[in-house]
Amino acid sequence: MTDVSVAVKPRGAATQPARGGHRSTQRSRREARAAYLFLAPWFAGLLVITVGPIFASLYLSFTDYSLLEEAKWVGFDNYITMFTEDPRFLSSLKVTTIYVVVSVPLQLAFALALALVLDRGLRGLSIYRSIFYLPSLLGGSVAIAILWRKVFGSDGLVNAVLAIFGIQGPGWVGDPDTALGTLILLHVWTFGAPMIIFLAGLRQIPSSYYEAAAVDGAGIWRQFRSITMPLLTPIIFFNLVLEIIKSFQSFTQAFIVSSGKGGPADSTLFYTLYLYLKGFKSYDMGYAAAMAWVLLLIIAGLTAVNFLASKYWVFYGDTK
Amino acid sequence: MSSGKKMWSAALLATAVLAVTAACGSGSGGGGDSAGGKTVLRFSYWGSDARQKMTEEVIKKFEAKNPTIDVQGEFSDFASYYETLSTKVAGSDAPDVITLEIRGLREYADRGTLADLASKVNTADIDAKVLGTGIIDGKQFAIPTGVNAFSLVVNPSLIQSSKAELPDDTKWTWDDYVALASKVSSGSGGKVTGTQLSWNPAYLQIYAAQKGEPFYNGNKLGLSPQTIKDWWAIMQSLIKDKGAPDAAKSSEIGATSIDQSLLATNTGAMGMWWSNQLGAVTKASGQQLDLLRMPKVQGATSSGMFLQPAMFYTASSKSEHAAEAAKFIDYMINDAEAGSIILSDRGLPASSKVLAAVKDKLPDADKKTLEFIDKVKSELADPPAAPPKGASAMEDILTRYSEEVMFGRMTPDDAAQKFITEANASIAG
């Protein structure tokens, strides 16, 4: 303790003796003002392009707004309808929840597994890393979603491979029982971003821990469980929060794979897709705005729960 | 000190530049009264690249005749057309001339977006009944560009090579249709599928008309649950007898564009589309395709088939250039010069004069369509009025419940009830 306070003192002392204090504060105030002025354009943009629309959408969520007419105030009607009279809303919520609950853990597990393999120090690591990261760059794109249709179509690649083994595969994207599965697979496939983050996290773990453990006779599995996992929990937590938020907002994949309708039979009707259909196809922008706010609340709630739960499983090496 | 000053002036300059650019942005977006003294007229439409090229050509001709008007085409694909259009209207930035289709007509007309075009555009050469589809509450909000009929497209050579025979379409029934489809599938050894399913509301509308029921009855559905169930039964037996692909494959094909349809890829012998799409399917398939009358319900007195405008031209009620807008629409509809470029791209020309003038220039497929429509004209029902507001969602709603039935996830009884409830809710508002 004393060491630290001693170390701090000289630094504090160094700023003290600036005797011309008056001039320097005036100068820094002027600099601050200039900084604010420089920031003004950005701040104006934030107000006009982000904050303004956010509050406008909050207002619209309490209105009946067709885009073509003036908005009419309807109070909480949109919110009430959503939970009482709109089975499609509930089914879109269900579809999205299944999507998130299945695809996020799978994707993270996959990303972690690959990160562990890559961390072993493969030759040509950077090439592999780039290759594995590639799907993440492409995954959200329209082209890949179209490709997905082809791969999982009834005459697609997957069925062609199955046919070699004499299996007649179903039309994966056309069948309501499997369509969501193909989208989950597409999401898992875009494991690149969390993988890179895991890889960085793995590099942070001092190799001396493993050496010590090896000396004590710990096998690979034991090392993974007792060293890697605990030290990696903050990274896992970070990825988890990020991916949950991201997947709740997934749109492009379902939009393209289902031709913008959430079909077959609403099996890929993601929350945001339904929101879009309501706003732009059914001319019900007020309802769509209300849905956006409900989604915000859901995501905020889940993230809060995540943070609370993190106390019990995330290990920050410096806190204990 | 001098560095402080510099910083200040830089910051001020940056802010000023931003203010100026912002002002520029709003200036050009605000309708733009003049571009070099010309009146700027904005014209929105959707379609393919080919249509855009063709339309730009027509616009050039129009501008040559009207040097004081500068027409700016605003073009997008159909999928995103209404999104862009509705946001423009919401932002008080509506184009002066707007292309709409019949499903979207009331969405816009009922909400005060459109101007009455009666006596502003010459409609003397348009069939009164067809023209009537653009009248809403007594006002001529929309002028039809051209007409189509929803019909059955067939590939005769695939039918023959599958050891089946072309039907006599003046008296074939839905049972004949199902039997023919499954015969094609079995006769070709599975290489060719009889037909593909369609969930187009026009198909159901034709079927219901044969049973004497209208699709819409004011702001409600005029269909009975029994009719919907009987209609689904046709598709169920098609799937069962292998006349059409199974439910999963069908929904997969249904989600793709017409170029990837069974007929277009020569893996199917029949399909149902609007007659103006004959050209597109023919081109994709590279084979000879024909139009047939839709099959009938046993003992039906009406064919149920009808002409429907392919598109409408409308003008914004907020336009500051109403006269120019009407002039442009008039040119697009009535001028043979425009017609000779557009041909049948927006349906067979609604104006009989234009149609007569361009008849010989039509591509072969469209000549066939014209011949077909002439042939069946006397059997056609009156063109139906524009469907109620909210009807643009009808195809999606119908497709969804139809798929639920085809996949066996809902009973036809249950689905018919739910379809009627949801459809009514959608068009009531």
Image (cartoon, grey):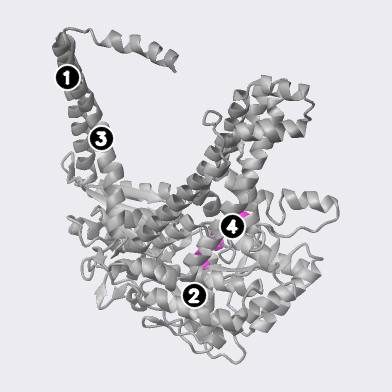
Decide which of A45, A206 is in the foreground and name it: A206
Which portion, as a residue range, is magenta? B275-284
The answer for which chain carries disc 3 is A
Residue holding disc 2: B374
Q: Is residue A81 left or right of residue A213?
A: left
Label 1 Cα neighbours within 10 Å, binned few <14 / some 14-19 / many ≥20: some
Tell me residue B92's x, y (percent): 23, 54
Q: Dot 1 lies on which element?
A: helix
Q: CA distance from mark 3 to mark 1?
A: 19 Å
What's the residue at 63%, 61% (across, down)? B253
Tell me residue B258's x, y (percent): 57, 59
Q: CA distance from mark 1 to mark 4?
A: 55 Å
Residue A144 in which image quadrant: top right
The answer for which chain carries disc 4 is A
Q: Earlier in the sequence, mark 3 or mark 1?
A: 1
Q: Which of the labelled discs sits on residue B52, or is there none?
A: none
Residue holding disc 4: A98
**Chief secondary structure of the magenta portion:** helix
Q: Amino acid at mark 1?
A: Arg
Tell me residue A293's x, y (percent): 37, 56
Contact? badges 3 and 2 (CB < 8 Å): no
Residue holding disc 1: A30
Q: Looking at the image, is B28 positioned above or below residue B224?
A: above
Question: Per the image, is A115 magenta?
Answer: no
Contact? badges 4 and 3 (CB < 8 Å): no
Callouts 3 and 1 in the same chain: yes
Question: Per the image, is B276 magenta?
Answer: yes
What's the residue at 62%, 90% (across, down)? B298
